[in-house]
Structure formats: structure tokens, C-alpha cells
Amino acid sequence: MNLIGPNVKVFRDQQGLTQSELAARCNLLDWDISRGTLAKIESRVRRVTDYEVVLLAKALKIDIEQLF
């Protein structure tokens, strides 16, 4: 359902972030996302919109291309 989920997890782990911490970063970018929703994204259970990809890249402080 999404291509980036596993890469989100890789970058999150590399940065030593928990799912809750990454969700908090996303919340600071005005994206109301829970830890559970982030877990669904990482496991490819939930779809990710283009806008959400942009926010995840910003929250992880990486280029969008790195998620693909």
C-alpha cells in the first residue's frame, strides 16, 4: 500500500528515534499523527499521501528522494 514505510523505519532507527518521538516531530509540523498510525505506515498497512511523504521527510530531516 505504500513504498516508503520500511525506509521511514530505517531512517528513524538510524536517528535513534522511537515511533512516539517521530510522531511528536510530525505533530510539530501540524500533522496530527499517532504512534499507532506511524506503526501502520512503517508496516505498509496504511497508505501515505504525497503531502504526508513531504512531512515525514521534514520530520526525519532528510530529502524526500531518500524515502523511495
Image: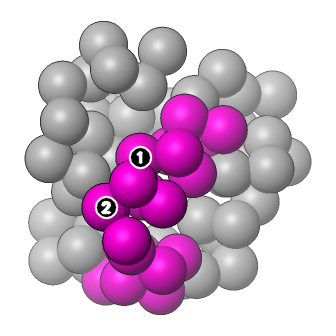
Horizontal side, residue 58 vs residue 19: left or right: left
Return the residue at label 1.
11
**How many circles with numbers are drawn on the protein?**
2
In the picture, residue 44 is in which quadrant? top right
Instruction: Give the x, y percent position of residue 15.
Output: 31, 61
Picture residue at 67% right of the left edge, 51% below the top: 41
Instruction: Give the x, y percent position of residue 54.
Output: 26, 35
Q: Is residue 21 visible?
A: yes
Q: Is residue 23 above or below residue 39?
A: below
Magenta region, residue range: 5-24
Picture residue at 42% right of the left edge, 25% below the top: 67
Q: Is residue 17 magenta?
A: yes
The mark found on residue 19 in the picture is none
Horizontal side, residue 48 vs residue 42: left or right: left
Q: What's the magenta bit mostly, secondary-structure-wise? A: helix
Q: Is the N terminus in the top left, top right, bottom left or bottom right quadrant?
A: top right
Per the image, label 1 sits on a secondary structure element best described as helix
